[in-house]
Amino acid sequence: RVFSSGAGELLYLESGDKQAANDCLVQAIRVDPRDAWSWVLLGNIYAKHEDNLAKGEKFYRRAFELDPHDAILLTNYGALMLETGNSEQATEFFERAIEANPDYPNSRYALAVCRRDKLFHNRNRHLTAD
């Protein structure tokens, strides 16, 4: 990485200074637009902290273009898909994340939650159809 390790941006986020984190990440992307991790963190700011899922998805998509095998990115992208109601796409992202890094537990947990929610939804749909 030329400019950013992500540590400073994470510290800004942890302290609640989303704007400073955003500014650092934008600068990092200007220096190295192929730094997928900066795009992931920028997506996190919008998807998780600003409740702007469309903008978060845009940044995750760019990170995915740069590094389609990053388990953290795939898990975060899947969580965003799940939040927007796209459980099929979410499942695909979680499964890809597990393939990319079988030792990353968040991907397995997210996939389990996704499958549980799908079963719950299907069961409720069946009960209300009667």
Image: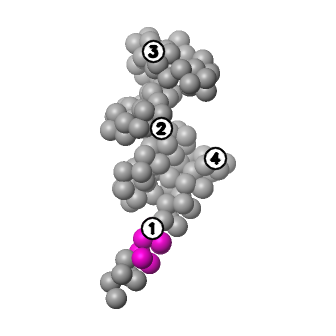
Q: Nearer the viewer, mark 1 or mark 4?
A: 1
- The residue carrying mark 4 is 104
Q: Quick check: marks 2 and 1 in contact, CB under 8 Å?
A: no
* Label 3 vs 4, first from the N-terminus: 3
Distance of label 2 from label 4 (alpha carbons): 20 Å
Q: Bin the neighbour count of mark 2 within 10 Å (Cα to Cα): few under 14, some 14-19, many 20 and up.
A: some
Distance of label 2 from label 1 (alpha carbons): 22 Å
Q: In the image, what residue occupies the spot 42% across and 53% down?
A: 82
Image coords of residue 84 (percent x, y): 36, 51
Q: Is residue 94 magenta?
A: no
- The residue carrying mark 3 is 23
* Label 3 vs 1, first from the N-terminus: 3
Going by the numbered disc 4, the residue's amino acid type is Tyr
Front residue of 105/47: it is 47
Q: Bin the neighbour count of mark 4 within 10 Å (Cα to Cα): few under 14, some 14-19, many 20 and up.
A: some
- The residue carrying mark 1 is 118
Image coords of residue 75 (percent x, y): 51, 46
